[in-house]
Image (cartoon, helix red, strand yellow):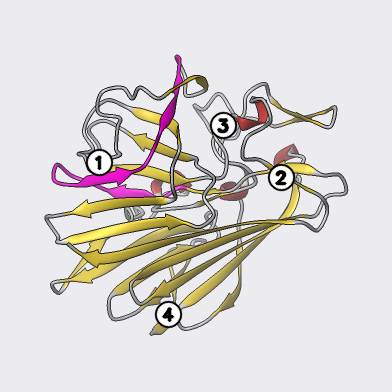
């Protein structure tokens, strides 16, 4: 494998890794997001994550980005921990709740790299008034048959705080694409994506326990009972992508926007708005120096 350093139009540096079958581009200063991940098949490069548009400074236009120190939305302008309220500000235009932590809004730096891997590090200190002081690393490694992403966050604050992690990959799709992931239920929502009730009766076209197409109305919901494995099949390219989250605790987030050429299936450690659910499911309270880690792999195979 070889490694290249490329430079996009300032100030957007790109780190690129390349092998005989893969090309990976990372944007350290854009939330440690992935600009492109491609697989070579039949002498053509196929995008496995939705490619970045090349100029936007919004992580939501990239192929994947890390979620730290929590995933998805928090209501009530923050959360209470050990009797103290910690305010969290809204952090995205048009979004009424703070979402996806603050790592995606900050510049990361490259702290280590090899021929087939790159490690990025963020040290956050109460970004935009958030209570979190932490260090997070994201290590991306090109494997012979895919991509490995390892996240680890270490709490650096004096008092303990609840943490969560996740990834936000965007997968290309079309009419032939099929998706499969285990679930035993889903959190339904009302007028916005905040959960209101849990059910094991899936709405029509929401059940992906068997491989199914990705058309249908909007899904922006947390599923329960996930076993850590999800499969995206591309029969038009003869490829299958298997995502595996180690030590999965059962939560996943699906975003299926109608009429678009991508969908998201997010490996996460806790459900939407876990900060205000009984027992704060999936959140992990870290004291100073303690670490929460998450590892996800994306393996490519022929159909």
Mark earlier in primary sequence (2, 3): 3
Q: Could you tell me which secondary element the residue under label 3 belongs to?
A: loop
* Residue depth check, mark 1 versus mark 3: number of the one nearer the observer: 1
Q: CA distance from mark 1 to mark 2?
A: 42 Å
Which sits earlier in the primary sequence, circle 2 or circle 4? 4
From the top left corner, tell me how far across and down residue 49 is, in percent. Answer: 33, 55
Q: Nearer the viewer, residue 234 or 124?
A: 234
Would you name the residue on which mark 1 appears?
210
Residue position for label 4? 4
Q: Label 2's element? A: helix
Q: Is residue 84 above or below residue 137?
A: above
> Does the image show residue 187?
yes
The verdict on residue 190 being magenta is: yes
Q: Which mark is residue 165?
A: none
Q: Position of residue 143 (x, y in %)?
A: 40, 74
The reply to whether residue 48 is in sight is: no
Cβ atoms under marks 2 and 4 closer than 8 Å: no
Chain part drawn in magenta: 168-191
Q: Which residue is mark 3?
A: 73
How many residues crowd mark 2 within 10 Å: few (<14), some (14–19), many (20+)? Answer: some
């Amino acid at each position: 494998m070889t490694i290249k350093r490329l430079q996009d139009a300032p100030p957007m540096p790109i780190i690129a890794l390349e092998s005989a079958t893969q090309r990976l581009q990372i944007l350290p200063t854009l939330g440690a997001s992935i600009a492109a991940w491609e697989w070579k098949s039949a002498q053509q490069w196929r995008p496995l994550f939705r490619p970045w548009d090349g100029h936007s400074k919004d992580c939501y236009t990239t192929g994947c980005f890390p979620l730290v120190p929590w995933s998805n939305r928090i209501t009530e302008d923050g959360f209470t921990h050990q009797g103290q309220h910690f305010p969290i500000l809204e952090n995205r235009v048009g979004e009424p709740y703070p979402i996806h932590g603050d790592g995606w809004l900050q510049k990361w730096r490259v702290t280590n790299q090899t021929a087939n891997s790159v490690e990025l590090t963020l040290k956050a200190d109460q970004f935009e008034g958030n209570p979190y002081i932490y260090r997070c690393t994201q290590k991306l490694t090109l494997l012979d048959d895919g991509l490995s992403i390892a996240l680890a966050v270490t709490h650096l604050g004096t008092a303990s705080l609840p943490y969560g992690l996740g990834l936000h990959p965007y997968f290309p799709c079309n009419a032939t694409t099929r998706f499969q992931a285990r679930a035993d239920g889903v959190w339904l929502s009302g007028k916005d994506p905040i959960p209101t009730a849990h059910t094991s009766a899936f709405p029509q076209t929401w059940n992906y326990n068997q491989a199914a197409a990705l058309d249908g109305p909007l899904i922006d919901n947390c599923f329960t009972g996930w076993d850590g494995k999800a499969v995206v099949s591309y029969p038009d390219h003869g490829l299958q992508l298997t995502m595996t989250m180690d030590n999965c605790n059962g939560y996943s987030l699906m975003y299926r926007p109608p009429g678009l050429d991508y969908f998201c299936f997010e490996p996460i450690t806790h459900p939407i708005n876990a900060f205000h659910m009984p027992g704060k499911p999936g959140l992990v309270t870290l004291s100073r120096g303690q670490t929460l880690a998450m590892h996800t792999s994306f393996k490519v195979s022929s159909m």
